[in-house]
Amino acid sequence: MPPAKPAEGLESFNEIATIRVELEDIEPPIWREMEAPTSMTLKALHETIQQLMGWCDYHLWEFSDENYRYIPPVDDMDWGDKPCRKAGSVRLRDICKDDKTVLTYVYDFGDDWRMNVSVTDIRQGDPDTSYPRYLGGERAAPPEDCGGVPGFYELLDAYGDPEHPDHEEVREWLDERDPHFFDELPIKYALLRIANRRNAARKRLRPKAT
């Protein structure tokens, strides 16, 4: 008898989607795009977005759609006008629609970084490709704790104007990093590390040869 259950599990494990994340209220846009498995939990999606943006994951966060807020496992976030679900218990495929699913992702309720997360093109992935896989992006992400969108614009103004009264302070705070420089290589490496961990789990789902 063929090993039906492992085969079905592997097929589900191989399902992927194209995911685009874009920061709200910033022009020109700051965005990232990747292919990711729909078996990914929203907690894992949060962790992957942190890698896409080069952030350090030390603030609270949540996802939301028209029905729910999806929150990390902390007790004091169960508030608001929508029922809550634990992000670690919800997979993308649990909430994805056939054509397009849009989530709002909020990171750091002080700086209030808001991102549109669109999930499209659900399909079977290439069994020889590691996921998640980085596809592209534009512009460096804002540094953490810079004061949200208004603070980010002020930081760019001060950094770019040697006559600005905060120019030297901003350069020192940035540790001489150029806030305009977008380095994609660390993103590719970070997603590859995530994909390699996932591949180890995928191998366990493959039916053993008889």
Image (cartoon, grey):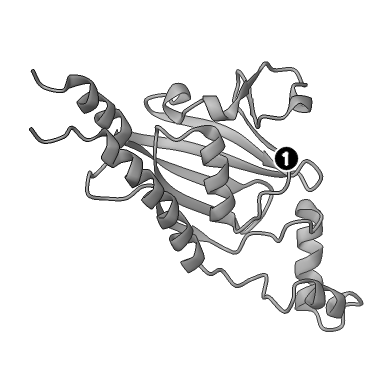
The amino acid type found where label 1 is placed reads Leu
Q: Note whether 137 is above or below 38 in the view shown.
A: below
Residue 37 location, quadrant: top left
Taking the view exactly as shown, the residue that stands out farthest to the bottom is 162
Q: Note whether 177 is above or below 137 in the view shown.
A: below
Q: Is residue 168 left or right of residue 143?
A: right
Residue at the image point whose x is 63% and y is 59% from the top: 141
On the image, the x and y values in percent for residue 102 come to 52, 32
Which residue is label 1 attached to? 60
On the image, the x and y values in percent for residue 134 come to 42, 55
Closest to the observer, 208 or 95: 208
Q: Secondary structure at mark 1?
A: loop
On the image, the x and y values in percent for residue 56 come to 66, 55
Residue at the image point whose x is 80% and y is 72% from the top: 173
Q: Is residue 3 left or right of residue 107?
A: left
Taking the view exactly as shown, the residue that stands out farthest to the right is 165
On the image, the x and y values in percent for residue 198 come to 38, 44
Residue at the image point whose x is 47% and y is 68% from the top: 185
Residue 40 shows up from this direction: yes
Quarter in which the C terminus is drawn: top left
* Total numbered labels: 1
Q: Note whether 187 is above or below 165 in the view shown.
A: above
Question: Callout 1: few (<14), some (14-19), or many (20+) C-alpha neighbours within 10 Å?
Answer: some
Residue at the image point whose x is 59% and y is 50% from the top: 50
Quarter in which the N terminus is drawn: top left
